[in-house]
Structures are given as C-alpha cells and as structure tokens.
C-alpha cells in the first residue's frame, strides 16, 4: 500500500491530465458529460459517476463528481448522466446509464474494466447498476452514504408527511395545500416548486414551507419560539428520529415535495399510491398513533417502486466499498444494512465517526482513501477495512496534499434500520383496511377543506 500511496501523491501533485470531452443530450431528455484523458484507448477503464438527488429539472451536462481530476490523472475515463427526470431518478437510471455507455463506446471505443461511483441517491444507483442484468459486468462500486434502503426510505417520508398533519393540526397543517383526491397528502405537480435544488438550502426550502414555520417556529431562535411551537417541533423531531433542526427541515421538504413528485409524475407512479400506514405501529407517539391517516398501497405502484429502487445484493463478482458518516440524518448510516446484502467477501462497509450530523460529510482524505482502497482491492490487495483505510488516509493527510481528518471507526455502533424507520407488517396488508381517517379523535386535527 505504501508504494501505491506514493504514486497517488505524485498524481495529486501533477494535477489532472488533459482530457477529451463529449457533452450533449439524449432523446430521453437526459444530459450527459464524458471526459477521457489523452492516451485513453478502447479497452481502458471507465468510471460511471452517479450524482445525488437534485430537484431542479436537468438543464445542462452534469458534473463528474469530486474525484474527477484524480480519476483522469490515473488514466480512467469518467462519464455521467444527468438522468431524464428530476428527483428520484431510479425509475430509469439503468436505461440512462446504458444510453451513456452506448454514447461512450460510439465516441471513444468500448471500455474495458467498468467501475461505478456515486453518493446518496447516486450511491444507490451505483449499487443497482452492479446488479442490473442489462449492464455489462461491473468490476467495482464505490458508494458513499448510499440510499441503499431504496423504497423503505419513502416509508419514513410518508410517515413524516402524515404525522405533520397530526402534530400541526390547526397550527400550520391547514396552511399546506391539498393535492387531488383521493391522495390529498400528495401535492399536484403544478403545486411543486421547480427550483428547490438538492433541498439542502434551508433558507430556500423554508421560504416555501410556511406551514412548518407556523407550526414549529423552526426558523426562529429558540428564545423567540412559543412553548407550543417548541413542543410541536420536539414532537416532530422525536417522531422522525432527528436531532438536528436543519435536517428536519430537509426531511419535511422531501416528505412534501419530492414524495409528491414521486407519486404524481407520469414518468414515476402516475398518481398511484405506493405507501401503507395501515397496521404500522406508531405507539411510541400516542397522538400520532391515534390520529395518523391510515392508507393502503396500490399493489402495482408499491411493486414498481420496489422494483426500481431496492438493492438485493446479487452483484456477481463486483467488489463494493461503501462509506457512511455515522450521524447522517438524511440517509441514515443504517442503510449499510442493505449494502451488506451483497456477499460478505465482496463488501467493505465502513463507518466514519463524526461529532456533528452531516450528509456525506467526508473529508477529502477519507474520500480519496476509500477510492484508492477499491482500486487496490481490484488489483489483488486484501479487502479493505476500517484500520487499513485509517492508515491510508493518515498517509494522505501527512503528505499535505489533501485535507483530513481521518475518522474510520473499527467498532461502530449502529441503530437497526427498523428502529429508525417503522417496519411495515406484511401480514396486516392482507386484512381489510380501516376506512380513511381524516379527523382523529379529540382536538388533534380538524377536517380540512380544499382551498
């Protein structure tokens, strides 16, 4: 490993090689960008980069990711699709990457070794490409904070969306527009802002979430919130298993806007409900348990969401390196449970121990160390683990060319996924559902009228 680190440092000092570029747009509407270093020839290696969820409609060629310069300097061609749809791109992500591969082969020649790389939603897409039967064999996958739970992540979103109606009854919930019946909890497409980006900009998102502000005062300093605001804010954060207020804002935005787009868009679920709350136990929050709307999924919609989104681990000979920050409150570290569905001998799943919550908040050295560990593994070195990653990361930082820290945890303690996202009891789904409950008992929530 020491010789490989020394060679890497020379590349970092030298900077990226000059590259040939191809950009454009496919008939599907997906934009693409390809770069190949001078000297790249047919049969050389290619990295397919997958970006994370962006709620802005694609308007131009995508970027090639945070490791672009290093990958080009190491001789890899790098290519990315912007996907044909905004938001949850899983429905057509494999087809978009097949289009990209076809364009690459036509322009530069057929690649040899194929690797995939992505973070967040892009990390899940990288994993899905590794097991997609339509794809050529993938030698290695580098998945950072992957949304590997797939459709189960949207169970958390529908829970939060409907819990909001209970917790904020009469104090904010009525300020949220209703969508078309019978799925009033999903906004219609013309009610969804088009410029929310990746939803990490709290100021921009809160500008559209007046209902959340009125209910919780989350935009106010704690000293200026009323006692009832603070209690409702605490209740929502407790329900969602969130400690950081910024992450609550982001999660509510996903639960209102991205979830609605997922349900309503004709290239997604076309107005069909994939979600079930009937039979789900919310007993740790009695008010929500008593008042939440009980809905039952359309079986075909639920199957489409699972089939497009879920990772099963059937990856052939692909080697996977997957890193997660320990306190991620958007894509929780327990998503690694799903990464580990792949054969143990082919998965290095490692946690980075952080002091404050971030989403994919890796240092530059941690990100490079993970990538180099995958490359070394593909060349016959031992499967990486937290100790070897920590050692490599430390060498990179000591060089002064990349910034740390290095925080790979050899003994992480992770909460089980089902303790964060309430499980769905499959047996309950075959029982007759209860009638829709629009007005929970007591004063938790009054009936809402369309405005």
Image: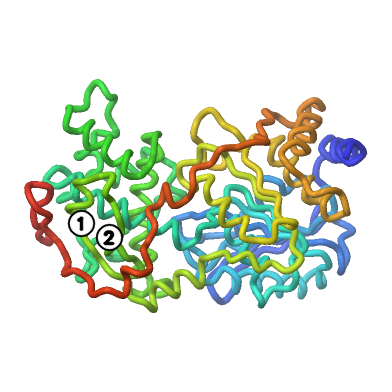
Task: Give me the residue at 39% from left, 39% from top.
Answer: 242
Residue appearing at x 32%, y 39% in the figure:
238
Residue 14 screen position, x and y as percent: 85, 38
Q: At which x and y percent is residue 121?
A: 54, 56
Helix, strand or loop at disc 1?
loop
> Is disc 2 in contact with disc 1, using a CB cutoff of under 8 Å?
yes
Side (left or right) of 391 relative to 299: right
Please give the label number shown on residue 177: 1
Alpha carbons under labels 2 and 1: distance apart: 8 Å
Classify mark 2: helix, strand or loop: helix
Horizontal arrangement in the rendering, residue 139 relative to residue 156 (left or right)? right
Q: In which quarter of the image is residue 424?
A: bottom left
Can you say whether 315 is above or below 209 in the image? below
Residue 209 is left or right of residue 357, and the answer is left
Depth-wise, is mark 2 or mark 1 nearer the camera? Answer: 1
Q: Of callouts 2 and 1, which one flags the residue occurring earlier in the amino acid sequence?
A: 1
* Residue placed most toward the observer, 164 or 281: 281
Residue at point 69% right, 53% down? 142
Left or right for 109, reference 422: right
- Disc marking residue 191: 2
Q: Which of 371 and 151 is in front in this view?
A: 151
Which image quadrant: the C terminus?
Answer: bottom left
């Amino acid at each position: 490993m020491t010789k490989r680190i020394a060679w890497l440092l020379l590349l970092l000092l030298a900077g990226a090689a000059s590259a040939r570029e191809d950009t454009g747009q496919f008939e599907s509407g997906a934009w693409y960008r390809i770069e190949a270093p001078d000297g790249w020839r047919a049969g050389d290696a290619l990295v397919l980069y997958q970006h994370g969820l962006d709620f802005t409609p694609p308007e131009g060629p995508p970027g090639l990711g945070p490791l672009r310069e290093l990958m080009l300097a190491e001789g890899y061609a790098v290519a990315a699709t912007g996907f044909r749809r905004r938001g949850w791109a899983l429905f057509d992500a494999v087809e978009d990457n097949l289009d990209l591969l076809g364009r690459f082969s036509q322009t530069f020649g057929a690649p040899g070794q194929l690797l995939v790389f992505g973070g967040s939603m892009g990390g899940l897409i990288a994993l899905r490409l590794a097991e997609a039967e339509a794809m050529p064999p993938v030698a290695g996958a580098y998945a950072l904070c992957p949304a590997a739970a797939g459709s189960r992540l949207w169970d958390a979103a529908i829970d939060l969306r409907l819990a909001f109606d209970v917790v904020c009854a009469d104090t904010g919930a009525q300020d949220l527009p209703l969508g078309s019946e019978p799925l009033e909890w999903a906004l219609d497409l013309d009610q969804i802002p088009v410029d929310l980006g990746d939803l990490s900009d709290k100021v921009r998102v809160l500008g559209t979430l007046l209902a959340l502000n009125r209910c919780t005062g989350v935009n106010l300093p704690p000293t200026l919130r009323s006692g009832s605001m603070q209690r409702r804010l605490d209740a929502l954060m407790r329900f969602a298993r969130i400690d950081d207020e910024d992450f609550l804002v982001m999660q509510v935005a996903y639960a209102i806007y991205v979830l609605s787009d997922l349900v309503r868009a004709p290239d997604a679920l076309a107005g069909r409900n994939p979600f079930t709350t009937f039979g789900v136990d919310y007993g740790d929050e009695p008010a929500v348990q008593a008042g939440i709307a009980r809905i039952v999924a359309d079986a075909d919609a639920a199957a489409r969401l699972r089939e497009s989104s879920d990772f099963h681990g059937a990856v052939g000979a692909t080697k996977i390196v997957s890193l997660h920050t320990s306190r991620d409150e958007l894509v929780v570290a327990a998503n690694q449970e799903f990464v580990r569905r792949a054969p143990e001998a082919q998965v290095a799943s490692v946690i980075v121990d952080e002091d404050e919550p971030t989403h994919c908040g890796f240092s530059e050295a941690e990100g490079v160390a993970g990538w180099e560990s995958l490359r070394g593994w593909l060349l016959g070195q031992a499967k990486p683990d937290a100790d070897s990653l920590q050692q490599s990361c430390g060498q990179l930082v000591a060089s002064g060319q990349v910034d740390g820290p290095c925080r790979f945890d050899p003994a992480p303690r992770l909460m089980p996924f089902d303790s964060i996202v309430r499980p769905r009891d499959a047996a309950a789904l075959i029982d007759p559902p209860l009638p829709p409950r629009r007005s929970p008992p007591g004063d938790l929530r009054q009936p809402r009228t369309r405005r």
